[in-house]
Image (cartoon, rainbow, N blue to C red):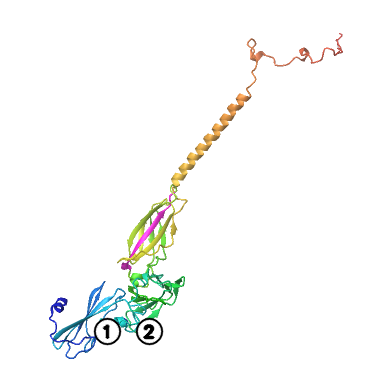
Amino acid sequence: MTQELTDAPSPSSPTPGLDLEFDPRTMTLRWNCQENATRATCRLSHREMGDIKVNAEAESCQCTFTRVALHGGATLKVSTTVDGAPVQEELPFSNPGGQTAWGPPCPPCRHPGEKNDTDPLFPGAEGTAARNFSCAIYNAAFMNCTWAPGPAAPSDVQYSLYMRQLKANSESNETECPHYTPDSGTHRGCHLRDISKLKYRTFFLVNGTSWGTEIQFFDLILSTREMEQISPPDNISVQCNASHCVLQWNQPRTKTYLTYLDFQYQLGIRTQNTERARGDNSVINVSGEVHNLYHLPSPEPRGPHSLRIRAADSRGGPWGHWSRPVEFGSRGQEGGLLHVYLLVVLGTLVCALVLGFLLNRSHGLRRLFPPIPQVKDKVTPNDQVDHQVDWAHVTTGAGKDDLEDVLTVQEVN
């Protein structure tokens, strides 16, 4: 089709211009209707999505495109036939400053031939738009969006975030961020405490304002599936027998409708080791099931373990946060036989040390206090020795100068 339009001969007589106008708020391209004009074809050339083709509405001179992000600019084209002569006209759309993409048609959005240099709004300065925009849904009930100021944005720049559900085109569905997150007075984030009205696809627009510089806008379309950070599974339980443990958990609650087939899980199991303080870690990938179960081989004696689980969309997307650890196993059972063996060896060693100490002490006492040797009578047999003492032959310890009276008693017959 493009080739045919390119090779088509130019009209032999001048044809009035179509006077194109584009309304980014409604994604509608309009032009002046011509007499004897056939039904027109519209194209939107997008840098990322390529060419988007739409047929003009019946008996009207306008086309409405599906919503796309326009911060990178686009080129719109209308092809029709007037009085049998082919006519086509283009309208480049650039990122203007100082207005919202949902506002009324702006002067720069008119046909280039009609734009004049006195228009108050020129395309905003490059690099003034917000960047690094992202949104995250967490706990299936809240959402945070963050962005950073453009590198060329002035110090007094202020950004505003607007959201629109793509399934509805009414103005009432356009909402501004209710709770901004400021940084040095500049909005750099938004917190939504209620996302019940958030549909599957949402159009985000970040506008900027400044006293001295026109600020370009940034827009983006995100789905809840792209934004959602899946919460950790809950109701995690572990039941063990002599040979294995059964791990069980519930499917996480999500904002986006997901079946059990859309989930994948990672089981983080840590086995604490007495020899290594950090223990042994292992990660097991498990697909979602109706009843989320996993049989972990773990024969007794079973040492202390901890289990954590996180989830992700099986079709792609980041992993969610880990759950809180669930402990199972027993420290008393860890290496029971090894503990008994160590206690036996330790008791034997202590007894040996105590006995050695006592023997060394006894030998030392003998060396300090040797026994007094006895005189052995080699002539008289031991059994005939009279061990009685004759006190008559024992001299007293009297001195030489002492006098003693001796009384002699004689028996007279």
In the rendered view of the protein, which quadrant contains the C terminus? top right
Q: Amino acid at mark 1?
A: Glu
Q: Give the x, y percent position of residue 282.
A: 37, 55
Q: CA distance from mark 2 to mark 1?
A: 33 Å
Magenta residue span: 260-273
Q: Magenta segment: does it hold 251?
A: no
* 130 to the left or right of 57: right
What amino acid is at disc 2? Ser
Question: Which residue is depicted at the point 65% across and 17% down?
Answer: 374
Q: Quadrant of the N terminus?
A: bottom left
Q: Is residue 60 left or right of residue 385?
A: left
Q: Residues within 10 Å of mark 2 (few under 14, many from 20)?
A: few
The disc, 2 or 1, on the residue closer to the chain's N-terminal end is 1
Q: Badge 1: few (under 14), some or many (20 or more) residues near its Cα, within 10 Å? A: few
Query: Label 2 belongs to which residue?
Result: 172
Q: Is residue 90 visible?
A: yes
